[in-house]
Image (cartoon, coloured by chain):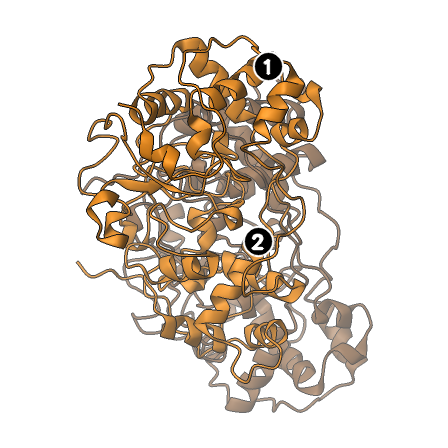
Chain colours: A orange, B brown
Amino acid sequence: MKPRHILQSTVAIAVVSFGMTSPVLAASPAEIRASALEYFEVIPSMVPAVKDNAVTREKVELGKMLFFDPRLSSSALISCNTCHNLGMGGDDNLETSIGHGWQKGPRNAPTVLNAVFNEAQFWDGRAEDLKAQAKGPVQAGVEMASTPERVVEVLKSMDDYVKHFTVAFPGESDPVTFDNMARAIEAFEATLITPASRFDQFLEGNDAVMNESEMAGLELFIDTGCASCHNGVNVGGTGYYPFGVVEQPGSDILPPDDKGRFAVTQTATDDYVFRAGPLRNIELTAPYFHSGKVWNLEQAVAIMGSSQLGTELDDDQIKAITAFLITLTGEAPRVEYPILPVSSPTTPKPATMVAN
Amino acid sequence: MKPRHILQSTVAIAVVSFGMTSPVLAASPAEIRASALEYFEVIPSMVPAVKDNAVTREKVELGKMLFFDPRLSSSALISCNTCHNLGMGGDDNLETSIGHGWQKGPRNAPTVLNAVFNEAQFWDGRAEDLKAQAKGPVQAGVEMASTPERVVEVLKSMDDYVKHFTVAFPGESDPVTFDNMARAIEAFEATLITPASRFDQFLEGNDAVMNESEMAGLELFIDTGCASCHNGVNVGGTGYYPFGVVEQPGSDILPPDDKGRFAVTQTATDDYVFRAGPLRNIELTAPYFHSGKVWNLEQAVAIMGSSQLGTELDDDQIKAITAFLITLTGEAPRVEYPILPVSSPTTPKPATMVAN
């Protein structure tokens, strides 16, 4: 069975070969580059424009404070950075996140790095952008377990936050809102990009930054069909595909209860459909898949081959593709740890107790 | 009853009056400064020397990584910074900390800021310095719940950490040790000082940085006897005193089960004895006392007056002393969030499950 509907659902497809290519360079670097540029884009090194939300210096500064502020959670212990750790590839390197009351979340935390380039947010794409996404974990009972009302009460209780909101959202009569919290976080997150990966340097014309194995891996990534779903500036993060289009992986890796995008669209064809994972910095964000059950990148590549492409990749191919994926690691954003406003007597007290 | 043994147990006492001084300046700024300099020292703006542990750039850099690395905990979720949040005054602003498995710790987390100047670490002084302290929470079952063996296994599994230990501890044949982890963290923590508070500027000769109420508060702080225990560079953090030397506060504030330093010395006179809290940045580190039961700084001042000094401070006095305490807030250290080494296939997996 050929994964036909994958091909139909992406626009960036050129010629895709499912033949077994051995990891020996079949083309010149220039030819490989030309082929790659049909699928991928160099990542911008500048902050990108964000829809309906100008990325201003004031918003970014406020958003950084909010991103690191555990008081957005009802326990005052969990911040965005807890699960999207900027020192660890923008995620928590756990199978699934641990949240309020040490509850285990349902899915692996996606990286916040370069997330601004994704078509939509969450594994099932249920948030159309980062400002929509930012409102989710704050309210989720298993994550930060707060409410919009509580967050606004927390933020309004601190004069320094009120000042920051006022300058970040000038002209608004009531700038401290849950919406604006999300907008500021989105603006900060738009700065969390990782430019200058070796792959980007290669795309820009530098042959010396990737070795033969890595270039062979890139060729294989295109020729075996990986790039059919994992393409664009984030090498993924656009388009929705069934996990197991050819052959479903075991229930350890694809838990039967999590039907993915079906929960968003209530459409039978969206059973076990997920957004294609963005692969930049994938080396930094084990464990893999929405279930977080696979810790080894080579194993993840092998599973993708069999489940999505119906291809049993051999060891050399797996190693070459993995070597290519490691060239996607870019320069991490440098962030000064923010000094947060001081709680005031009217700041709601932490709610660390958990109902049984 | 006069708190005689407090007076006997400090050396820096000059003339102490327990009379009710109203918060009106009884002396000139120069006289107040002269009196203050008998009790307090300007905080150094440079990294201090640390006993048996040269503070090198390489050690500080490594220590910063370790301080922020949640993989020092068995869950890979809790770092030193979780409870000693550098954006929030160097503590967690919780009554008592939440640790592994959402367990509640027994005491309020002390600030890490300026901790290098304390005579000893922990509320009961059971660690003689920060390198001894750093080993505690890592192993405590209710905090990070790891072991020295696991920590070393974690650190040795990452080449980048091995390199950092090798340059930070040159000439050592096996530099990646639990001891050296603690030394590196101590070196980083020695950089976490908060210079240039308004109080320091006043001590240095600037009359304009403190207003009359704050100077009156400083006078009261000395004259009523607060400075008998809270003195030195950290305005506390040296010497051990019973909580409730004159009158024990209620069991809500002084829980009967926590006998403080008694657990360290097994000496009956150390019942409910604790290290005098260091008061720098006290504005940032509510709630107060080892129990963390008092959220309001004025209330904490009033309790200290009655329990330690046998003095019912009036509202004006409480406000003045509190105003003085707020001048102790210094410049927070600026820290670039560290990019951590990537876990390898041999890094022990997070142990997020908790035995019931």
**Residues packed near mark 2 inside 10 Å, few (<14), some (14 to 19) or many (20 plus):** many
Residue at image position (62%, 15%) is: A211
Q: Which residue is mark 2?
A: A190
Side of B44 relative to A299 (left or right): right
Residue A191 x/y as whole percent: 60, 52
Side of B88 relative to A167 (left or right): left
**Residues packed near mark 1 inside 10 Å, few (<14), some (14 to 19) or many (20 plus):** few
- Viewer-nearest residue: A294 or B340: A294
In the displayed structure, would residue A70 be above or below residue B308?
A: above
Residue B96 in view here: no
Q: Are marks 2 and 1 in contact (CB under 8 Å)?
A: no
In the displayed structure, would residue B5 be above or below residue B86?
A: below
Residue B158 x/y as whole percent: 51, 24
Helix, strand or loop at mark 1: loop
- Please tell me in which quadrant of the rendered image residue A62 appears: bottom right
Residue at image position (26%, 53%) is: A265
Label 2 amino acid? Ala
Instruction: State the CA–CA distance, disc 2 to disc 1.
Output: 44 Å
Residue A176 x/y as whole percent: 50, 76
The chain containing the residue under callout 1 comes to B
In the displayed structure, would residue A298 be above or below residue B288?
A: above
Q: Which quadrant: the C terminus of chain A? A: bottom left
Residue B149 in view here: yes
Q: Which mark is residue A94?
A: none
The chain containing the residue under callout 2 comes to A
- Viewer-nearest residue: A76 or A27: A27
Helix, strand or loop at mark 2: loop
- Please tell me in which quadrant of the rendered image residue B196 appears: bottom right
Label 1 amino acid? Ser
Residue A11 x/y as whole percent: 46, 39
Q: Which quadrant: the N terminus of chain A? A: top left
Q: Which residue is mark 1?
A: B173
